Image (cartoon, grey):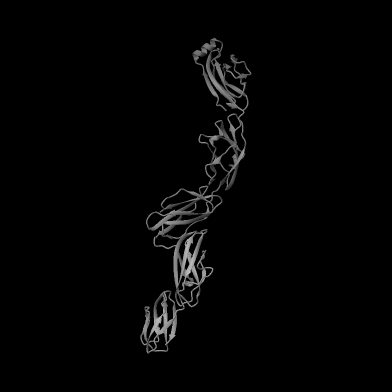
């Protein structure tokens, strides 16, 4: 509604005297004139005139494109309401003239009245945030609604006193601040426009989540704590009702903006240049801006690092049985397509000499020759070869004798991982001596006995008759 225009008539003493001479007393008054609506959805309107005070001004109306329930271009006594009817929808300009009690005009003003059957469009609102951590949120109303739409009706899951709905003025930045109802959850709202003509548009429904609790079970797991290339992949995950976003800060080549994800994602990034220890911080938040606690990570950048290995079960250094279990290990993340190729001193099987899916435990059979057996494992991710590693084990440790006289040569097994050995049955003392390809032995017993002292603290004893 147009704000009333006010005119204050203050009569001076001298003027009052003139009015008195004309038969009028001393008067002070206020007159307000305004349209009931500055714009209408019909071709009818009402001009209102209000007088406060004890004086009796007159008025006249003029203009084209409309009729009134009083004659136009005629000086009339002020009346409270004048009915107006436009010839057609559009814009009409009324000219109002106010007269003193003596009939002299003292004010003339133009009033513009617009009318239209226009109906507002269906709203296409969105919110300033995907979800809200508190009760306050901005409802954004695109300017495509048109210049004649200046109010919006909102009802639904709002603060209790507002839930039945009300009209809000739409400010110049197209953002209306609304207060949601208490408690977390999906808030459903109904929205419609009202234009300057007083016509409501169609109703549309929209919703936003109110969420005050942060995500839970937040984690960031690097593929490994060491990288040989400066390139590292991190699996980031959290439990949350709704979308999530993350970023990685710290010793990285580029700090990127927050990126959205659902439940889990893998971030691939380059560390800052140069080998050494790199400190990273992973930040995770939900759509409402609730954050997990920062997750610190320390990654070592070491160009000598190999992202895979293989060992024998129980870290065995030797075995009497050719059937053994190997334990492959490769740096990977869940979901990676990793395969491996097992070769070396092993018997061909469904697990060897071909690419097979990665497994952290594989049964293989060593080739039956006594001695050191090597198992080679190659790893690849997708079709890219990533690493090749080897593990060795000694099959069937032994002692052999070379010669037949009083003095012979005792030949030990060259067990990888043997720190020293003790040889008995000879005159010569051999107690925890370093490995040698053979030992001269003057027979002092019926057999030579060798005890191997291994790096894992265990021993293995073998003998051979002279």
Comparing 304 with 61, the one in front is: 304
Residue 56 makes an appearance in the image: no
Q: Position of residue 359 (x, y in %)?
A: 52, 65
Expressed as whole percent of the image width and height from the top left, the position of residue 20 reads 54, 11
Which picture quadrant has residue 306?
Answer: bottom left
Q: Which residue is rendered at x = 52% and y = 44% of the image?
A: 129
Residue 392 in the image, given as x and y percentages of width and height: 44, 72
Q: Position of residue 242 (x, y in %)?
A: 55, 50
Check the image and report above or below for 338 versus 23: below
The quarter in which the C terminus is drawn is bottom left
- Is residue 460 shown to the viewer in this render? yes
Q: Is residue 191 left or right of residue 294?
A: right
Q: Nearer the viewer, residue 276 or 386?
A: 386
Image quarter of the N terminus:
top right
In the displayed structure, does residue 429 sit left or right of residue 161? left
Q: Residue furthest top?
A: 21
Residue nearer the viewer, 451 or 204:
451
Q: Is residue 407 above or below residue 324?
A: below
Q: How many marks?
A: 0
């Amino acid at each position: 509604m147009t704000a009333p225009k006010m005119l204050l008539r203050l009569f001076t003493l001298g003027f009052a005297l003139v009015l008195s001479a004309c038969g009028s007393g001393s008067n002070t008054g206020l007159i307000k004139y305004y349209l009931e609506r500055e714009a209408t959805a019909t071709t009818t309107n009402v001009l209102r005139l209000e007088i406060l005070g004890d004086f009796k001004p007159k008025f006249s109306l003029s203009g084209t494109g409309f009729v009134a329930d009083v004659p136009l271009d005629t000086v009339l006594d002020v009346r409270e309401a004048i009915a107006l009817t436009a010839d057609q929808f559009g814009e009409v300009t009324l000219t109002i003239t106010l007269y003193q009690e003596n009939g002299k005009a003292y004010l003339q003003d133009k009033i513009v009245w617009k009318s239209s059957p226009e109906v507002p469009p269906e709203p296409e609102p969105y919110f300033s945030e995907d979800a809200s951590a508190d009760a306050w949120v901005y409802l954004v109303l695109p300017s495509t609604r048109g210049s004649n739409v200046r109010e919006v009706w909102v009802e639904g899951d709002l603060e209790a006193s507002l839930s039945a709905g009300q009209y809000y003025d739409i400010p110049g930045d197209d953002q209306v601040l609304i207060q949601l109802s208490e408690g977390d959850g999906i808030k459903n709202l109904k929205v419609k426009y009202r234009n300057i003509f007083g016509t409501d548009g169609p109703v549309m429904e929209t919703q936003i989540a109110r969420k005050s609790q942060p995500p839970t079970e937040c984690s960031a797991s690097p593929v490994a704590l060491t990288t040989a290339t400066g390139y590292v992949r991190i699996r980031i995950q959290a439990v949350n009702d709704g979308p999530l976003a993350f970023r990685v800060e710290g010793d990285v080549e580029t700090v990127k903006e927050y990126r959205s994800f659902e439940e889990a994602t893998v971030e691939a990034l380059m560390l800052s240049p140069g080998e050494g220890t790199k400190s990273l911080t992973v930040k995770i938040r939900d759509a409402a801006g609730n954050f997990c606690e920062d997750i610190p990570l320390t990654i070592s950048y070491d160009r000598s690092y190999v992202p895979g290995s293989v060992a024998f079960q129980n870290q065995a250094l030797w075995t009497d049985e050719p059937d053994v279990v190997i334990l492959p290990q490769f740096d990977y993340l869940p979901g990676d397509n990793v395969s491996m190729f097992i070769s070396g001193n092993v018997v061909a099987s469904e697990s060897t000499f071909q690419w097979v899916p990665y497994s952290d435990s594989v049964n293989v059979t060593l080739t039956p020759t006594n001695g050191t057996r090597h198992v080679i494992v190659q790893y690849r991710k997708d079709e890219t070869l990533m690493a090749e590693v080897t593990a060795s084990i000694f099959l069937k440790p032994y002692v052999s004798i070379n010669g037949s006289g009083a003095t012979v040569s005792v030949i030990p097994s060259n067990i990888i991982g043997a720190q020293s050995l003790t040889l008995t049955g000879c005159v010569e003392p051999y107690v925890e001596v370093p490995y040698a390809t053979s030992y001269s032995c003057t027979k002092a017993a019926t057999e030579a006995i060798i005890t191997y002292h291994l790096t894992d603290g265990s021993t293995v004893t073998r003998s051979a008759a002279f």
